Image: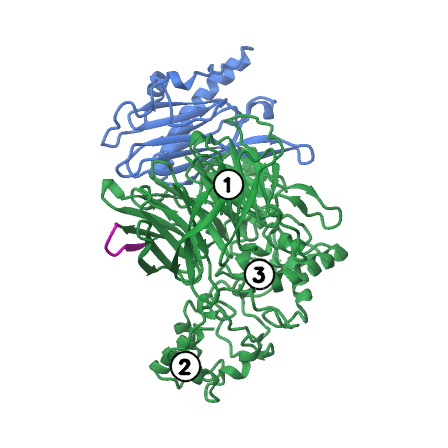
Chain colours: A green, B blue
């Protein structure tokens, strides 16, 4: 998203919201020059190759994505080539010899290779959902060719691809458990927000910043954001799994206090150690060679965090945190500079970091610590991008912020709805009772030992599991209607849903500051309706199979379109009783049987399915639906295939 | 009873006898000896000598006493801990007041953890006045230990805080590594 030129004379920044590539001259501290290049679509990522820039563009018009090759002269950019790619082109990385570029296409889950000498696409292959960051390395064990690791926004496994200058690539899914040292025993946690990956200089390690959903900590209702490290020699995780039963020896007086649950703060009483740095929304990362550290920008907390890259689990050991935000308005208490950092680049001497902040449209320059020990960090320097604030300014900042206490409990809207999409997770909506205090919250997992070790016994509603299942829906492009919202249609309006969300998405319920919450909801509302870009859809004629599927969808024999009304985002917004499946393992039986018809817009790219996320594929949903929703039991295999093909076009 | 239980008891027994020596020293009015910190760069690396292929018994107290200090792959600055090696066995001793030790992940085979109990009336002055972790280093290892210290606070009196991690790793095809890091 931000890159420095090898000659250190300029920074280039991909600005999706304004469809512009910004250029800033270096050094930027004193009167930098600026120039803008207007892109043909939203530019996502940018890299420098020699005197050229490579820029991914998510979608051009109603068509596919592209990789732009831009010639550079000073700050001026000129399009030299445009290479068509699968829609939602996002991440880009180049082989060490600068011959081949790899590009991820997020929504269409494709990985493409481009020969930079000929500007031809060598291949495009299907990968798992939401591929994002790419780290390219030389071939393993001195073999010819290359290998690359790809992060995914959704899920804990990552992708490895081996490829050469010609021929087909080989793809492999690599298991990389999220935060294994902070996981409940014998549990492989899901991950989210895997925007980026970076390799060590020797190529023996690959670092994946992301959130481990359900990782344990004293009050981490959503999990823990950190960095998972892959040893690339054998594609094995560097951190071992936490022992199911820790072996410990404590002094007697400590052991006795632990047994009494006296309320003392006792690291060690908790079966899981706490992270030293808990990131909320890790977004981008670079490797700082001179200190063997990782610099990770935390979009939610407005921080740049420097982590030990040699540790098995970098966020478990000591780290440095550089605050990015500057000034605060007196009404909404939002930063005037340095909000929602999403990209980071280093100076040539690695003593400065340049951080692009998306909510305030500025670059913050941070003087980095020279080494170990105490270091007084000078305040960051602000370099504006010349972008005027718009009416969505405050809502945008609130959407990304995990630090506005009335809105977020440590994870922002963007934490579960990255880019307005979804995290692929099914959350637990739980009503708790702790003494006289009752509250209803979302939590990511089922292990409450961290909570109870700190807060004592906690009662909760429901039996057979922990809370009711709530799959995260996509929100971008699905919020035009006045209401109702919520899986049970319990919020009459979008504003009411936002206010309910302020209380649900945290630990211990919402705050009592109703007037501020109302003000925040009214700022957030226009942003979530107008400021989020829906996943791209390529305009094209339906295939014969898709047309057959549409006819089935609209047919009175299936009744699909009766509730999923095409004219209103494929929903009638009514609450209808659902012939329920038994509760999923780990969840309680929801006593409320009426569910609001969800929108089917973008349904093909947003598994899992059903309100409780029990189906990983549309095939599974249709296979087991029978006649629970509409009537699909009578459909032949070909008809089901056609119906699914049509659903994927929505 | 598992092997590590036996080892733990064995180490505990040796530590108790050492502890009683320290107690008698203290009773005689002499200051408790704290070994001076040795600059780790001057020490031989813990893996300077090849590791034996066969398993051996845990070292005796005499063997530990005679063993020279070694340098780990990484240690933080200003840390009051030191390491020794005998055959494939490594001992990390921290002369800092310690509340407890824990093996977070990895094999329990052969490990021993020790934190001494208080003596005399000065409970807080003598409890956990040092700590020791003993473990064998063998191919395939991936262990993580946690060292937890006392922390004095205002409103809750004393508490505990996790202070160091010890990572031991010997992956296939690689060299053994032992890193100690501040939390």
Instruction: Give the residue number, with chain letter if any, for mark 1.
Output: A11
| Mark 1 crowdedness (10 Å alpha carbons): few <14, some 14-19, many ≥20 | many
Which of A362/A591 is in front? Answer: A362
Q: Is residue B86 magenta?
A: no
Give x and y (percent) for residue A553: 46, 82
Q: Quadrant of residue B82?
A: top left
Q: Tell which residue pokes out farthest to the bottom in this image.
A: A556
Residue closest to the eye, A94 or A233: A94
Residue A532 image label: 3
Question: Is the residue at mark 2 from the same chain as the one at mark 3?
Answer: yes
Mark 3 belongs to chain: A
- Residue A168 drawn in magenta: yes
In the shown orientation, is residue A1 left or right of residue A399? left
Q: CA distance from mark 2 to mark 3?
A: 30 Å
Same chain letter for marks 3 and 1: yes
Circles 2, 3 touching at the beta carbon (< 8 Å): no
Judged by depth in the image, the label closer to the viewer, 3 or 1, is: 1
Disc 1 versus disc 2: distance between alpha carbons? 48 Å
Mark 1 or 2, closer to the camera: 1
Q: Secondary structure at mark 2?
A: helix
Q: Quadrant of residue A636?
A: bottom left
Q: Tell me: residue A363, above or below residue A642.
A: above
Secondary structure at numbered mark 3 = loop
Q: Which residue is depicted at the point 49% across and 17% down?
A: B22
- Span shown in magenta: A164-172
Q: Is residue A589 something one can see in this rendering?
A: yes
* Percent coordinates x, y for residue B113 in the rendering: 43, 32
Q: Which residue is mark 2?
A: A547
- Mark 3 vs mark 1: which is more N-terminal? 1
Q: Name above or below for residue A286 compared with residue A608.
A: above
- Side (left or right) of A151 relative to A420: left
């Amino acid at each position: 998203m931000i890159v420095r030129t090898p000659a250190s004379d300029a920074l280039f920044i991909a600005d999706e919201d304004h469809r512009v590539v910004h250029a800033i001259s270096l050094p930027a501290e004193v009167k930098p020059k600026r120039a803008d290049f207007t892109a043909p679509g939203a530019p996502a990522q940018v890299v420098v190759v020699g005197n050229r820039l490579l820029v991914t563009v998510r979608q051009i018009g109603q068509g596919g994505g592209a990789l732009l090759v831009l010639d550079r002269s000073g700050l001026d950019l000129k399009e030299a080539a445009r290479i068509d790619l699968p829609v939602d082109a996002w991440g880009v990385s180049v082989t060490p010899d600068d011959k081949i570029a790899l590009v991820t296409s997020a929504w269409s889950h494709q990985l493409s290779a481009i020969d930079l000498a000929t500007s031809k696409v060598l291949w495009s292959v299907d990968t798992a959902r939401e591929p994002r960051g790419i780290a390219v390395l030389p071939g393993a064990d001195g073999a010819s060719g290359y290998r690359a690791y790809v992060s995914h926004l959704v899920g804990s496994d990552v992708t490895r691809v081996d490829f050469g200058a010609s021929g087909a690539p080989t793809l492999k899914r690599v298991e990389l458990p999220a935060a294994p040292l902070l996981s409940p025993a014998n549990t492989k946690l899901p991950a989210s927000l895997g925007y980026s990956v970076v390799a060590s200089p020797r190529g023996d390690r690959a670092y994946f910043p992301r959130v481990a959903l359900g990782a344990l900590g004293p009050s981490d209702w959503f999990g823990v954001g950190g960095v998972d490290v892959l040893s690339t020699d054998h594609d094995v995780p560097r951190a071992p799994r936490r022992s199911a039963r820790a072996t410990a020896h404590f002094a007697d007086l400590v052991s006795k206090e632990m047994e009494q649950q006296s309320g003392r703060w006792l690291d060690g009483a908790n079966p899981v150690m706490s992270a030293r740095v808990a990131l909320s929304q890790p977004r981008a990362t670079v490797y700082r060679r001179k200190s063997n550290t990782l610099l990770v920008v935390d979009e939610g907390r407005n921080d740049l965090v420097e982590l030990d890259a040699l540790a098995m689990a970098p966020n478990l050991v000591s780290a440095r945190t550089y605050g990015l935000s500057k000034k605060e308005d007196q009404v909404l208490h939002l930063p005037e500079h340095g909000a929602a950092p999403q990209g980071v680049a280093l100076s040539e001497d690695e003593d400065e970091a340049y951080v692009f902040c998306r909510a305030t449209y500025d670059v913050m320059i941070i003087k980095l610590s020279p080494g170990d020990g105490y270091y007084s960090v000078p305040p960051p320097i602000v370099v504006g991008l010349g972008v005027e604030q718009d009416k969505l300014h405050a809502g945008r900042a609130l959407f990304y912020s995990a630090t506005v206490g009335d809105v977020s409990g440590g994870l922002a809207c963007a934490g579960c709805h990255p880019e307005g999409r979804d995290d692929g997770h099914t959350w637990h909506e739980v009503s708790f009772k702790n003494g006289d205090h009752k509250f209803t919250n979302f939590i990511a997992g089922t292990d409450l030992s961290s909570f109870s070790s700190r807060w004592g016994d906690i009662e909760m509603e429901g039996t057979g599991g922990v809370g009711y299942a709530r799959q995260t829906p996509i929100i971008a492009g699905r919020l035009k209607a006045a209401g109702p919202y919520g899986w049970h249609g319990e919020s009459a309006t979008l504003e009411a849903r936002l206010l309910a969300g302020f209380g649900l998405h945290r630990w211990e319920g919402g705050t009592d500051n109703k007037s501020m919450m109302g003000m925040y909801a009214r700022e957030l509302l226009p942003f979530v309706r107008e400021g989020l870009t829906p996943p791209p859809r390529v305009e094209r004629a339906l295939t014969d199979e898709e047309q057959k599927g549409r006819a089935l969808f609209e047919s009175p024999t299936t009744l699909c379109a009766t509730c999923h009304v095409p004219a209103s985002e494929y929903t009638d917004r009514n609450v209808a009783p659902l012939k329920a499946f038994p509760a999923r393992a780990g969840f309680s039986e929801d006593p409320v049987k009426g569910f609001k018809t969800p929108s089917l817009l973008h349904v093909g790219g947003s598994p899992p399915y059903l309100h409780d996320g029990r189906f990983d594929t549309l095939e599974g949903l249709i296979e087991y639906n029978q006649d629970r929703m509409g009537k699909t039991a009578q459909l032949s295999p070909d008809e089901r295939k056609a119906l699914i093909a049509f659903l994927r076009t929505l | 009873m598992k092997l590590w239980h036996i080892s733990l008891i064995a180490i505990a027994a040796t530590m108790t006898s050492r502890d009683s020596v320290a107690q008698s020293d203290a009773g005689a009015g002499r200051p408790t000896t704290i070994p001076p910190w040795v600059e780790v760069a001057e020490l031989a690396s813990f893996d300077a000598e090849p590791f034996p292929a066969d398993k051996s018994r845990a070292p005796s107290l005499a063997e530990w006493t005679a063993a020279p200090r070694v340098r780990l792959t990484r240690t933080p600055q200003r840390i009051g801990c030191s390491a020794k090696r005998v055959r494939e066995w490594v001992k990390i001793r921290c002369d800092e007041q310690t509340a407890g030790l824990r093996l977070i992940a990895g094999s329990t085979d052969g490990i021993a953890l020790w934190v001494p109990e208080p003596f005399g009336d000065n409970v807080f002055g003598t409890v956990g006045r040092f700590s020791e972790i003993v473990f064998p280093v063998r191919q395939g290892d991936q262990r993580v230990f946690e060292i937890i210290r006392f922390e004095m606070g205002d409103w809750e009196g004393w508490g505990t805080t996790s202070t160091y991690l010890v990572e031991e790793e010997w992956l296939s095809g690689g060299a053994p590594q032992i890193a100690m890091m501040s939390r």
